[in-house]
Amino acid sequence: MPMQDSDPERRNLMVTSIAFIAYFYAGGSFPESNVRLQVINAEFSQPEILALIAWSTFCWFIYRYWVTHRGNFIASFSNEFTEIREKLYIINFLNKELKQTLHINEPNNEYYASNLRWVGGSVVATCNYASITRNPEGKIVSSSSGGGIHNRAPKYIKFKGIKGWFLVFRATLSCIIKQPSFSNYVVPYFLSFLAILGAALRYIF
């Protein structure tokens, strides 16, 4: 069954990793010393050379994937994770920490969650102060964030305690399941690791 993936480096690595996983974990072997390719009618008396070529190709695919995608996961996951600041369970937690009621779409002379990110092994929400001026009809005529006449410095809310870490786990798991960065950039490395582990379990341990 062909694998549909627009990224050639990821597709090559995943297909090769799955083939290696199937071979090592399902007990694959070459029953004869000679390997024959029916398509081109060729016969190889040294299958270990074919194994060396396969491993070299596999290592090349890992290298190419790393070169073309290094740093992409951190950037993509950070963007996906900060979007979770608008989730109700995040807003409710920040409300209790700030002792106010946050408005997601139109903050009005109050703090609002502008960012959510991992910092030094913990999750921190950045809350900036929004100052909004409206005309008699209720339309916004001017707005500012941060300082200004209110001189409200940003507040940094750290998620801690049992409830805080539970929300961190929930938010991170939500990103892994619902957003593409984890499956795009981490799963190929995981499959490669499983393929190498399968070879190690067979030939080393």
Image (cartoon, grey):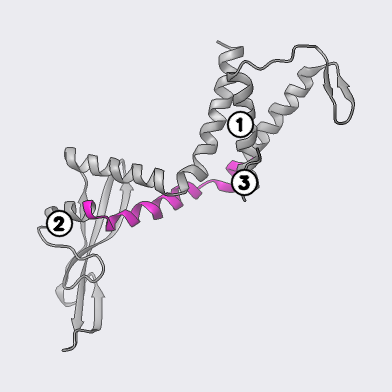
Q: Position of residue 85 (x, y in %)?
A: 28, 56
Callout in the foreground (1, 3): 3
Q: Which residue is mark 3?
A: 4
Secondary structure under tag 1 reads helix
Q: Which residue is mark 2?
A: 95
Give the mark nearest the N terminus, 1 or 3: 3
Look at label 1 and name its amino acid. Ser
Q: Which residue is mark 1?
A: 17
**Please, which residue is most extreme toward the bottom here?**
136
| x then y, percent, for residue 96 | 12, 53
- Rounded to the nearest angstrom, the CA distance separating label 3 from label 2 is 44 Å
| Residue at x 39% of width, y 53% of height | 80
The reply to whether the C-beta atoms of the residues labelled 2 and 1 are less than 8 Å apart is no
SS assignment at label 3: loop
Q: Position of residue 88 (x, y in %)?
A: 23, 55
Q: Which element is circle 2 on?
A: helix
Residue 62 visible in the picture? no
**Image quadrant containing the C terminus:** top right
From the viewer's perspective, is residue 79 above or below residue 176?
below
Which badge, 2 or 1, is on the more N-terminal residue?
1
Q: Quadrant of residue 137?
A: bottom left
* Marks 2 and 1, how far apart at CA: 46 Å
- Mark 2: few/some/many CA within 10 Å (<14, 14-19, 20+): some
